[in-house]
Each structure stands twice: as C-alpha cells, then as structure tokens.
Image (spheres, grey):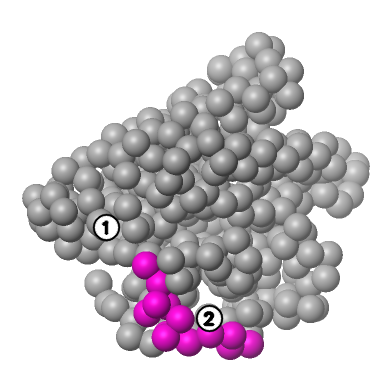
Amino acid sequence: MFIFLHLFLLTLGATTTTSAAAAGGRVSAVIVFGDSSVDAGNNNAIRTVLKSNFRPYGRDFMGGRPTGRFCNGRLATDFLSERFGIKPSIPAYLDPAYNISDFATGVCFASAGTGYDNATSDVLSVIPLWMELAYFKDYITKLKSHFGPMKAKETVNEALYTISVGTNDFLENYYSSYSTSRTSSRYSIGAYQDFLIHIAEKFILDIHALGARKVSLTGLLPMGCLPLERSTNAVSGKSGCVEMYNKVARDFNVKLKALAGKLRSEVRGLRIVYSPLYDKLLDAIDHPSSYGFENVEEGCCATGMFEMGYLCNSWNPFTCPDANKYVFWDAFHPTERLNSILADYFMNTTLAEFLWS
C-alpha cells in the first residue's frame, strides 16, 4: 500500500499541522472494528445481502472502483490513517488482494450490519463482533510470523484502535419489525443500552489483554436524522428527524462516554478516548452552508430516501452528479466529504493526544 510522506491535517479546509507533527507521533497502525460506518469491504467475502461492491459505490474512491465501502469514496477511518501519516486507505482483512505486509500498518475487521449484540449480526447474516475479535487474534499471530514477536508487540501496542458500532443494534434490531430476536420484548430501552455497554466493556478489555493501548470509542450519530428515518417519518405524515431515535442515541452516548472514562481510570496502560460524533454531524445538518453542503435530507444515491446496498446501483437514474454537496451518500451513510470533515474534527479533539505519544 502507498505511504504518504507528507501529512496535511485539515480543519474544515484550513491546514493546522504538517507531516512533521505526524512524524513525531507513535501511531504504528490504525486498526478498525465496527459496522458499515467503517467496513472497508469485509462483507464482500461473506454470504449476506448487505454489500456495496458495485457502482456507484466507490465512484469517487481512488481509481473510481467499488471496494465494499458504503460510501462514494473513503471512510473517516481512511482519512484518519492518512492524517496520521500512515497510508491513504485501510484494507479489509478478508480482502484477498492484501496480505500481512499491507495489514501491518492498518487493517479493518468491521462488518456492515453488525452490532454489539450478536442478535444484530444475525439479522442480515454478517460478521458478529466476537468474530471481529477472532480475526484480530489471527492477525496478531500472522504479525508475529511476519515481524517477529518483539516488533509485532510494538506494532500492536502503538496502534490506534477505533471502534464504531451500535446504530444497528437499535435501528436493525431493537426497533426493527423484521428482526426475529424479540429484543424489545425482553428489554426496556434503558436496560438494552446497559446490556450493550456491558458487551462494549468486555470487548475493550479483551483487545487490551491482546495488546491494545490506544483506543477511540466512537459515539452514535443522530440516527433519527438519517434519510431513511426521515423518509419513514414522512410516510407517517410527520416531518424532520425522528426525535425518539435521536434521544436514544444521546442517552447511549452518555453511557459510552462514562464507560470510556471508567476504563481509562481503572485499566492500567489503557489510553481510551470517547470520540463524540453526534453534535458535529448534527451541526452539519443544521448549518449545511457553513460546511458547503446543500442537501441534508436525502442521500446522493438513487432517490436518497430509502435506498442503500443493492437498491443503490448504477442503473438508478436519480443519483446526484456531485456527492460533495450532500451530507449523506445513500439513505444511511455519510459522503466521503463528510467523512473527511469528521476525521479532521477527531484529529483536532479527542485523537490529538496520539499525534505525539
């Protein structure tokens, strides 16, 4: 994979640091766990209907090729890797085009459609979080064979681990009419959030036991403002974002932030930060012109109201010509431009401490 020799850290279009800053950093790799917000193409390799390895997905990616990312281009994690001066994109672990030498400086274990809850991954037959952990263990074994134990340990210890997951637990499981898990009948929403927090805590402790030291726990976005939820709201005669879903996201984020604080203070050697997504994305939705956006209600792909995955395809005549004007690419996922903005925001806030140590 390509290595960027020069780093430009942007803050909404203004340069605030250079490659010298990244060169002083100690982030050896960016290692990614999560769902479709960060899946670089692992779902291509499994039997699921939730795929995006076809146009127009990837039309603005390097080379204009679909990779399995649910975006017109790069993801926020790709931009983070670039901002840390490592490489411009992070490959999927199950992509046969890459090997351990590529994965040594960054790898993605994420699977679109997954959640903290195993029942969430069952909805669309995707990779559960425990399997992402198993892939990470396999990765460490291969890294030791590639580098030797000492260098592998250093790489694992100095990597940045990003965890971006949770939205599907609510929208595709708890509140979904087609989920068969009966989750909402077994838990109140507050109890279910606590159940997910317990899983998140165990997962973080598990990767810490395997060597993770620098961890970014990403909060939920305002999921009631996703085009899919806005469109569903409109069908029922209402308008705007679904406040009930946004409140669930806010409440869960409070618990995620508290978990990060608890683990940072209690677990020796763990430098975990909570990376808030909600307010920054909502600000882009509420003040689009400040970010250069023109459309916040529909996605660029197809009609932008309900389509994602196979419904967002190259045969649909309605896909917009310029995704940079849109906050959302399809009915569920941000555009490459918004991903870049979010990456810059994280680099200047929660992840700044990892630039130098």
Residue for point 43% across, 66% down:
357
Q: Residues within 10 Å of mark 1 (few under 14, many from 20)?
A: many
Number of dots carrying numbers: 2
- Up/down of 291 relative to 169, above or below: below
- Picture residue at 12% right of the left edge, 58% below the top: 147
Verify whether residue 268 appears in magenta: no
Q: Which residue is mark 1?
A: 155
Determine which residue is flagged by label 2. Answer: 9
Q: Find residue 137 and report its horizontal and vertical position in percent.
A: 25, 39
90 vs 329, nearest the viewer: 90
Task: Report the residue at 68% width, 15% height from top.
Answer: 187
Along the horizontal axis of the image, is 289 left or right of 169? Answer: right
> Circle 2: is it few (<14), some (14-19), or many (20+) Cα within 10 Å?
many
The secondary element bearing badge 1 is classed as helix
Q: Amino acid at mark 1?
A: Thr
Pointer 1 with pointer 2, Cβ within 8 A: no
What kind of residue is marked 2? Answer: Leu
Residue 257, given in percent of the width and then of the height, sits at 66, 43
Q: Is residue 250 left or right of residue 54?
A: right
- Which type of secondary structure does the marked residue at label 2 adopt? strand
Q: Would residue 146 be visible to someone looking at this image?
A: yes
Which residues are drawn in magenta? Answer: 14-26
Q: Quadrant of residue 244?
A: top right
